[in-house]
Image (spheres, rainbow, N blue to C red):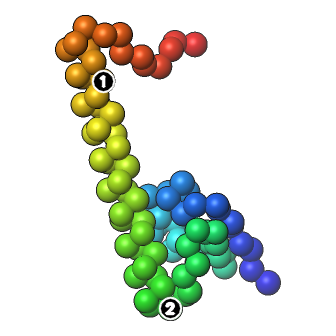
């Protein structure tokens, strides 16, 4: 009987190449990743679909970070206060 790791959303767990590395490690130890928003099987087609979803989520995250950076820069150029992390 194997162990399952259950995540609600696949892209919240890991992105891109890290996901493939972790999946190989899971396979090596008999652990199965179950993403509730991605119900693919363990076939070659299922693995391809998982890899595409992982790569797309990594791309999406890069786009979000860039959009936020450009928005903060524009606010700063307009003389507005740009919120950032607060020191502890």
Q: Residue at x 46, y 82 (%)?
A: 47
Q: Residue at x 64, y 69 (%)?
A: 36
> In this orientation, which residue lies closer to the viewer: 43 or 66?
66
Is any part of residue 63 visible from this angle? yes
Measuring from the top left, give residue 52's x and y in whole percent.
37, 73
Query: Badge 1, how many Cα within 10 Å: few under 14, some, many 20+?
Result: some
Q: Residue at x 35, y 10 (%)?
A: 81
Asked if marks 2 and 1 touch (Cβ < 8 Å), the reply is no
Q: Which residue is drawn at 69% across and 66% down?
A: 6
Instruction: Using the image, determine if residue 44 lies above or below residue 54.
Output: below
Q: What element carries label 1?
A: helix
Left or right: residue 49 versus residue 65 is right
Left or right: residue 36 versus residue 72 is right
Measuring from the top left, give residue 67's x and y in whole percent.
29, 38
User: Label 2: which residue?
Assistant: 43
Left or right: residue 65 versus residue 13 is left
> In this orientation, which residue lies closer to the viewer: 86 or 63?
63
Q: Residue 12 carries which label?
A: none
Q: Which mark is residue 72?
A: 1
- Image quarter for residue 25? bottom right
Q: What element carries label 2?
A: loop
Left or right: residue 76 versus residue 61 is left
Instruction: Using the image, determine if residue 13 lies above or below residue 38.
Output: above
Instruction: Using the image, determine if residue 2 lies above or below residue 60.
Output: below
Q: Which of marks 2 and 1 is in front?
A: 1
Measuring from the top left, give residue 20's x and y in whole percent.
45, 69
Instruction: Give the mark nearer the N terminus: 2 vs 1.
Output: 2
Measuring from the top left, give residue 61's x and y in whole percent.
37, 49
Number of marks in picture: 2
């Amino acid at each position: 009987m194997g162990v399952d790791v259950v995540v609600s959303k696949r892209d919240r767990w890991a992105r891109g190449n890290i996901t493939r590395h972790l999946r190989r490690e899971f396979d090596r130890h008999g652990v199965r990743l179950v993403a509730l928003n991605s119900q693919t099987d363990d076939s070659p087609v299922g693995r391809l679909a998982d890899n595409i979803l992982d790569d797309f989520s990594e791309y999406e995250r890069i786009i979000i970070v860039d959009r936020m950076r450009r928005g903060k820069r524009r606010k700063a150029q307009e003389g507005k206060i740009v919120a950032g992390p607060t020191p502890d």
